Image (spheres, helix red, strand yellow):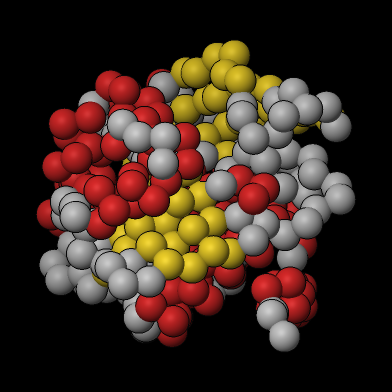
Amino acid sequence: MADPVIIGTVALDSIETPFGKVRDALGGSATYASLAASFFSKPGILSIIGRDFPKNHIKFFNSRGIDTAGISLGDRTFRWQGFYEFDMNEAKTLRTELNALESYKVSVPGHYKEAKYIFLANIDPELQLEVINSIKNPELIVMDTMNFWIGHKKNQLLKTIKKADILVLNDGEARQLFGTPNLVKAANKALKMVSKAVIIKKGEHGALLFTDKKHFSAPGYPLENIKDPTGCGDTFGGALIGYIAKTKDAGEKNLRKAVVYGSILASYNAEGFGPEKLKSVSHEDIEKRYREFRDITEIS
């Protein structure tokens, strides 16, 4: 059984930053999320690719224990081209080709339907809702989104959010969605819509976890060498759901650990182009950085 099930995009990205560039690199929200989740669990992807998608990428997914039975085949793969200036918190889009994604219809394999954990990575909220309705009895639904869906499909987005247990979004998206510059107010509005928690990502400055009675602030890991932040938010969400699926614990204390693991994998991801750095990270590397996080946040 694939658990968690992750829906999102699988793409070919062309990216340029002040520190280099890549062309037609493996990308997409489901790609980053699934790779991060695979450090802790056995995720299954729901997405679509084209006939132009390199077969070695599928072999790589499978080598990491990622179930690809939920990846549909279309004509041409979704492609994104963008660049970053020295403000690495914001990507500038040069070109987007939806291709097969434009006509994507979700097809959930039978063995995915027993999954207990779902991560709705960045994709059309109507597709996210289809996945929710296709899984028999999920115990936890974690949902991500982006500014495009807030601006273009807000009503559908809000409908899907109400089905989620945990909402994950960045600070700009939180302000945009809830119409306030104050992140605490935005989180409180979001908590009225979801059953468990809200997580607001703040890029290099870490992440905030809000529940009804408590909040937790995880710092960003102080990186000296940042090459490419593409996919860091998706990596964060994938590690979060992967760790929860491994521990089978969505309590507030364990959510704090999951947020830290999400931040750790995202920090590693930023150190390479595309998901290249995630290919070489070990469990020992992750635990070493976890201990560093504990030292960073300790108050004596």
Picture quadrant where residue 138 is located: bottom left
In the rendered image, residue 249, in percent from the top left (x then y), is placed at: 37, 83
In the rendered image, residue 224, in percent from the top left (x then y), is placed at: 86, 50
Q: Is residue 143 left or right of residue 38?
A: left
In the rendered image, residue 74, in percent from the top left (x then y), is placed at: 37, 30
Residue sitting nearer the eye, 275 or 62: 275
**Residue placed at 19% from the left, 53% from the top?**
193
- The quarter of the picture where the N terminus appears is bottom left
Q: Is residue 170 left or right of residue 279?
A: left
In the rendered image, residue 96, in percent from the top left (x then y), is placed at: 50, 18
Is residue 35 among the parts visible in the rendering? no
Residue sitting nearer the eye, 66 or 56: 66
**Residue placed at 16% from the left, 31% from the top?**
155
**Residue placed at 38% from the left, 71% from the top?**
214
Residue sitting nearer the eye, 24 or 218: 218
Q: What is the residue that sits farthest to the top in this orientation? A: 94
